[in-house]
Amino acid sequence: MAEITIKTVKSLNVLSLSFTGSYEQSGDRLDDLLAWVLRAGHPWSGSLIGIFYDDPEKVAEDDLRGEVAVPVDEDCDGDDRVARKSLPGAEMACLTYEGPITGIGSAYHEVFEWLRASGWQFREELGTRELYKRLPEEKVEGQPTGGFLIELQVPVQKAATA
């Protein structure tokens, strides 16, 4: 089992792009957001972020809600697609995942199993976050591709005691 820690994450100003549907499109939506940010000339100030609000095992794929975001320090406005907002701070159960994106589901299962056993509960309204610390390397013929390095953040609160 990977190490899971609780840490306090501060609120963060971001530019974000929301989407509905398969979470597999988050990479394409992140490309869209980064293209918008570069065209607008806004430098980002931290790791790229994916935020996921629904459990794909419980919600139909067409109804899944997510967003991608980039942290920004400067004052700037979004438009009709890109929103400037503040992600709320929270206590987070954090796990570092390294590997192909297809394996991230097992990391989520580990965190939620740990929560059930540890006296913490998931704050569903905030969604889960993935901070992309390293994106996979470009595919080069004849060479293996590198994997992701993702900090998985699950917002939590102490579970109520009976």
Image (tube, rainbow, N blue to C red):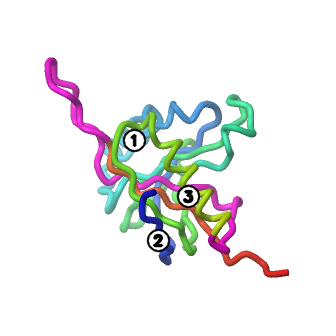
**Of 38 and 20, the residue lying toward us:** 20
| Quarter of the picture holding the N terminus | bottom left
Cα separation, mark 1 vs mark 2, equals 34 Å
Pointer 1 or 3: first along the chain? 1
In this image, 140 relative to 52: left or right?
left
Residue 135 location, quadrant = top left
Which residue in the protein does label 1 denote?
36
Magenta-drawn stretch contains 125: yes
**Callout 3 touching callout 2 (CB < 8 Å):** no
Extreme residue toward the bottom, this view: 161
Density class for disc 3 (Cα within 10 Å; few <14, some 14-19, many ≥20) is many
Which residue in the protein does label 2 denote?
5
Badge 1 amino acid: Trp
Which residue in the protein does label 3 denote?
111
Task: Name the residue rendered at 67%, 74% in the picture.
Answer: 119
Q: Which residues are magenta?
A: 118-147
Task: Name the residue rendered at 55%, 58% in the picture.
Answer: 111
Element type at mark 3 = helix
